[in-house]
Amino acid sequence: SKLETKPIYLEGASFGGSVVLRHAQMYPGTFDGYISFDGAVSSEMSQKSDRYFVFREIVTQRYLDPSSHIDELEDQVLLIHNADDNNVNLMVSLAFYEKAKEAGKEEYIRVLLNAKGNPYEQQDIVNTG
């Protein structure tokens, strides 16, 4: 098939970003790369997020926390984060990257920061990013 010669990436947003990185850590090499979009990828920093109560029960479980398993990272990861995200604070992705640097894993991480996540105006908006 045509897809057999194409790179395939696993992407997840918010809590899905956390799941994507845990998949990368637990099953290295199953995708060509991984993308976390505004991901809750650091339990330590997620606790400081604007809406921590949403993830409280999930991100405090060490086995689900990608930042607790940085040493298991062997594949390329792209962290995309919007500075105006009011669910998962930008510092969550930056903390994950800093922890990866400390562990000597920065070669696997690329970070893309956007100033504004929603390119169009919405009325009665609750979530941004």
Image: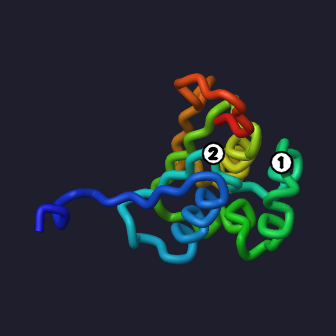
- Label 2 Cα neighbours within 10 Å, binned few <14 / some 14-19 / many ≥20: many
Residue at 60%, 68% in the rendered image: 22
Q: Badges 1 and 2: C-beta atoms under 8 Å apart?
A: no
Compare marks 1 and 2 and give the one earlier in the sequence: 2
Tag 2 residue: 38
Numbered marks: total? 2
Q: Quadrant of the N terminus?
A: bottom left
Residue 55: percent from left, percent from top: 79, 60
- Label 1 Cα neighbours within 10 Å, binned few <14 / some 14-19 / many ≥20: some
Q: Amino acid at mark 1?
A: Arg
| Residue 99 is at least partly visible in this image | yes
Tag 1 residue: 51
Q: Is residue 74 left or right of residue 81?
A: left
Check disc 2 and report its element: helix, strand or loop. Answer: loop
Q: Amino acid at mark 2?
A: Asp
The residues bearing labels 1 and 2 have C-alpha atoms spaced at a distance of: 13 Å
Check disc 1 and report its element: helix, strand or loop. Answer: loop
Residue at 49%, 52% in the rendered image: 35
Q: Is residue 120 above or below residue 39?
A: above
| Residue 90 is at least partly visible in this image | no
Foreground of the two, 85 or 80: 85
Residue at 28%, 57% in the rendered image: 7
Residue 72: percent from left, percent from top: 60, 69
